[in-house]
Amino acid sequence: MKMPTNDLEGAPVECLPLTRPPVPLFSLRPLAGILLRQVYLYRRSIPRWMEIFYWPLLDLLVWGFLTLYLRQGVLPGTTAAQALLGGLLLWDMLYRSQQGISVVFLEEIWSRNLYNLMVAPVTPYHIIAGAMMTGILKIALSSGTAILLAYLLFSYSLFSLGLSLIPFVLCLVIMGWALGIMTTALILRFGQEAEVLAWGVIFLFQPVSAVFNPVSVLPDGFRQIAFFVPASHVFEGMRQVLSGRGFSWPQLGWALVFDLLYVAGSLFLFSRVLKRARKVGFSLKLGS
Amino acid sequence: MSDGHVLVARQLTKRFSPDRPPAVDGISLEVSRGEVLSIVGPNGAGKSTLLQMLLGILTPDSGTVRIFGVDIIRHRRRVAHLINYASTDLSLPYSLSVRENLEVFALVYNLPQPGQAVSEMMERFSLEPLAKTKVGRLSTGQIARLSLAKALISRPEILFLDEPTATLDPEASAEVRQLLLEQVRKERLGLVYTSHNMREVERLSDRILLIESGKSVACGTRDALYGLFDCDNLEAVFIRSVNQARQDRRRDENADK
Ligand SMILES: Nc1ncnc2c1ncn2[C@@H]1O[C@H](COP(=O)(O)OP(=O)(O)OP(=O)(O)O)[C@@H](O)[C@H]1O
Ligand SMILES: [Mg+2]
């Protein structure tokens, strides 16, 4: 059988001239289109507006409080570097722990896989438990590296905190889990809009966590709030150990009490969000 | 064909917003072992919404869904291992390879021999050449095939598919059809699926449920529907029944005013 072929093959082919000129490289309208897309996006998005003001404000608070503290001179018996580096290394564990959970859910949402898991014979709490384990592995790797580098580069050993390091880390990891579950709930509730929270929410707690400065230098109001934040008790405890005043059991007790309250609260929020999602429908196309 | 129902749904109703008509409105259906039930209807008729309620993921405003006698809305966990689902609206983790994805789901479904189950599915869906390819690099049709492999890996008793062949070429959809029919005949799988491909629905279904605006328009075998609407193909049945349903609805609305 002979297939029909292109009759023009071999013959010279003429093309029509351009019917309209191309878009000039420096024309403004396409640029305006790109800008308009962002304007439309921001017009409806509260989380995105928050972000514009959020970071500078929180950075200002954290570094401002640190300045207040430095003006008073450093802790007796320790160096400023020790308190700062210790704070930084421990803070990172809290951050990783929260991220661990939020990112696991985000990955499922991004790859449009959450629904497959919802159908499967696992509960969302299985996913959370899996995320907690992933989080611990991530912390072990990232903090392990950071602790080693701090030792090699700055001769600072986090292990100078001794055995008290164990309860401190535990309290921070648990607080991270609670915040991770909470952000996940908000992401499931508000959709992609709330994704920025996964990276931002933890910094809301930084100024009242007394990471780099004692609670005592915080202004009124902040000081009261700090009491309800498990991390502030951990960092206070850390500075107490560093200054040679020993381990504080009350601090650990408060940290644990608030940790448990945070976890309970975030699980409650999460279960409410799930129930609501079952009513109004998970967005199937979430994340696509 | 019927040796007891594996799925019985009664009077399912779901309204997403008070100022819009219900997405699903009083639909009842049942599925037997080894039976294929197709759900057919115009875009936005409520097919996907109905499937989600049958899967126990969306809580209906009223009505019940029983799978092997278990109320799936209240006790999903008891029967979740017996059902599975694939939809063109879903995907699988992009950065995992085809084989890795199946491995994950073999574990999630608590299969006793995960490795063997994965190999079987890879073979049945001709996925071996793609074993190491990441999902993000697959074509839409290849993802559809992988999703079906994921849906069958747990050897479900009831399979729910939302437009499984929508993105497949004619040859691939014929293959998938063949695979599904085999599974239905051999394993006595109950299959509930939606499609806009009327020729495929004609070939695959034991019974067809026609819905329009969330309401059941007709339900029966292909030939029963042909007779009911005096047509000789499903496309004609679809157009005639949907138009008729719309006219009836408008007449009722006007009568109400
Ligand atoms: N989560 C939701 N929230 C609000 N409305 C929804 C939601 N899901 C579906 N709807 C609405 O319910 C109706 C039915 O939608 P559904 O997705 O079930 O239709 P469908 O029959 O699957 O359509 P298609 O053939 O296009 O897939 C539509 O009007 C849709 O807009
Ligand atoms: Mg649909």
Image: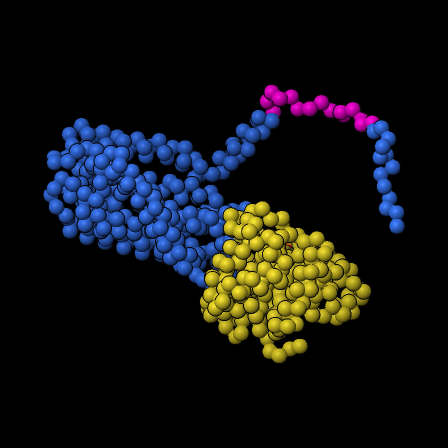
B41, above or below A35, in the image: below
Asked whether residue B204 is drawn in magenta, I would say no
Q: Is residue A28 magenta?
A: yes
Q: In the rendered image, is residue A60 in sight?
A: yes
Q: Nearer the viewer, residue A241 or B20?
A: A241
Give the letter of the yellow chain: B
Return the x and y of residue A260 as percentages of the image width and height: 27, 55
Residue B228 left/right relative to B125 = right
Location of residue A148 by image quarter = top left
- The residue positioned 28% from the left and 54% from the top of the image is A261
Question: Number of marks in the image?
Answer: 0
Which of the two residues, B160 or A38, is positioned nearer the viewer here?
A: B160
Classified by dominant secondary structure, the portion drawn in magenta counts as: loop
Measuring 54% from the left and 56% from the top, which residue is drawn there?
A: B99
- How is the protein colored in the picture? by chain
Taking A134 as reference, is B237 left or right?
A: right
Instruction: Tell me if residue A4 comes above or below residue B153 in the rendering.
Output: above
| Percent x, y of residue A157 | 22, 40
User: On screen, B143 above or below B66?
Assistant: above
- Among the 4 quarters of the image, the one containing residue B254: bottom right
Name the residue at 14% across, 48% down. A247
Q: Position of residue B203 (x, y in %)?
A: 73, 65
- The answer to whether residue B60 shows anywhere in this view is no
Q: Which residues are magenta?
A: A14-29
Image quadrant in which you'd find residue B151: bottom right
Give the chain letter for blue.
Answer: A
Q: Residue at x 34, y 46 (%)?
A: A141
In the rendered image, the residue lying farthest to the bottom is: B3
Q: Residue B97 in the image: state x and y as whole percent.
A: 53, 51
